[in-house]
Amino acid sequence: MNPAEWLNRTVDVFLDRPALLLGNTVVANYGALAARVASLAGWLARSGITPGDRVAVFAKNCPEYLIALYGIWHLGAVAVPINAKLHPREAAWIIGDAEARLCFVSSDMAEDLAEALNGASCALQPIADLPPVSDLPRTAPHPTLPNDVIWLFYTSGTTGRPKGVMLTALNLTLMTLSYLADVDDVAPEDAILYAAPMSHGAGLYNFVHIMRGARHVVPLSAGFDAQEVLELSAEVGPISMFAAPTMVRRLVDAARESGGFEGIKTVIYGGGPMYLADIVEAVEVMGPRFVQIYGQGECPMAITSLTRAEVADRSAPNWKARLGSVGRAQSCVRLRILRADGTEADTGEVGEVAVQGTLVMAGYWTGHSNGAESTAKAIRDGWLMTGDMGALDADGYLTLHDRSKDVIISGGTNIYPREVEEVLLTHPDVHEVSVVGRPDPEWGEDVVAFVVFRPDAAVPEAELDALCLANIARFKRPKSYYVVPELPKNNYGKVLKNALRDQLKEMTK
């Protein structure tokens, strides 16, 4: 199914309903949105873009972002959204790898991108200056087939070059339907707030809101500002939004201080570890507004979910264990936990998370990299190997431990950093923490913790040690604590453990 067909079906019912908002100002209703999309598709065709061509979008969040995406799909081309926080050279590499023929770009980024492209054959079009609605006859959306690739999603690439994940029309259709089955319902009076990059998870949730005729809101800041979110939700609500755990932390801090969160309907969190202490506090402050999802670009937004009711439940005997999980398998996938030898792990045993289903990507884009080899490594016997370590309980709830590369092996014993982090975060003065392994000549690795305290707080090492010894085995406690003002994060809010390990190497030289 072509997403542009979903837009046209919504227009049949909700022609005059507000569609695009910048802040609290309506900039287009659904009729105007569809007209601009069809006109842009015609302009792309006249510019030489054909079905199957790749068209990149390297732009900050803006209402025109959706127009560009749907214009690309209307024509039958493949969208290549690129996070606007990337360096122009990184964006240029993605554009070259995808062999994109055109890129919609924010005006203030165009010059640097053009320089980074260094004459590559990719035309640049300022996204704020999309062609006006044309009087030429409008064509119907391209008859996209289920297995046609429509979104080329580049992974975050925290180690090595990012890989282009080929997402098909069927992948994204099932992801959208899984949202309604496993995450949340959407009503026409709802709004989705794009406070996280539209190039990634937040943008993937546009489809279900287009289907239901809901509003699409871009904050004036074009990004995440906790106070702006609270104020905008009061004016525009009910809003739903996708947020990384670090964003949830900041939103809860702002809500605790100023209140005013009644306009927020749903906060869907994912993209990194949400620690138990943080989500407990979030529900205490803001109530049952939170839903957790776990997914990867290779299985977008739809491996597991922990529902609003499950996140808010405190009556079940094992509610803490469930709240520390990422939920159960979503409707269109199957889960397994595999040992290193490929056999299936027992209930409660930690192994690599594997997922199977029609939501799993078609494979990695070949481009200039070896996509076929990468695909063969990632998908084995029809199962996507996620690289995440986790365990399933008897009720099917998946608890993640760490990426396989982040597991600390000390004296031949596996130590999962998240377990240690969870304990340290129960201290009221610990704001953030990240645990990594440090090379040790005797044990192989030992455990160290990088800690961010709350403002004006200082906690003695002995107090942190006592907290760990009261909750986890002695061999798991950190051997050293490094107090830092902040943790290094990538453009998606994930803590860069590689950067912390590099810091350790410099400190031990």
Image: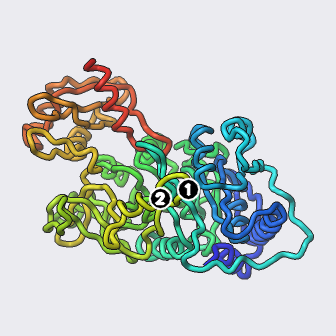
Q: Residue 373, image x and y in percent?
A: 41, 59
Above or below, comparing residue 255 to residue 352 in the picture? above
Is residue 143 in view from this perspective? Answer: yes
Residues marked 1 and 2 touching at CB (< 8 Å): yes
Q: Residue 438, image x and y in percent?
A: 22, 31
Q: Residue 272, image x and y in percent?
A: 38, 50
Q: Which residue: 26% across, 64% down?
A: 398
Q: Which residue: 73% across, 70% down?
A: 75
* Residue 280 relative to residue 55: left or right: left
Q: Which mark is residue 326?
A: none
* Residue 385 relative to residue 51: left or right: left
Other-residue count near label 1 (Cα within 10 Å), few / some / many at <14 / 14–19 / ≥20: some
- Mark 2: which amino acid? Gly
- Mark 1: which amino acid? Gly
* Residue 133 occupies quadrant: bottom right
- Residue found at the very far top of the displayed protein: 509
Q: Which mark is residue 371?
A: 2
- Secondary structure under tag 2 reads helix
* Residue 337 relative to residue 258: left or right: left
* Residue 355 occupies quadrant: bottom left
Q: Which residue: 50% across, 72% down?
A: 171
Q: Residue 146, image x and y in percent?
A: 56, 79
Q: Which mark is residue 367?
A: 1
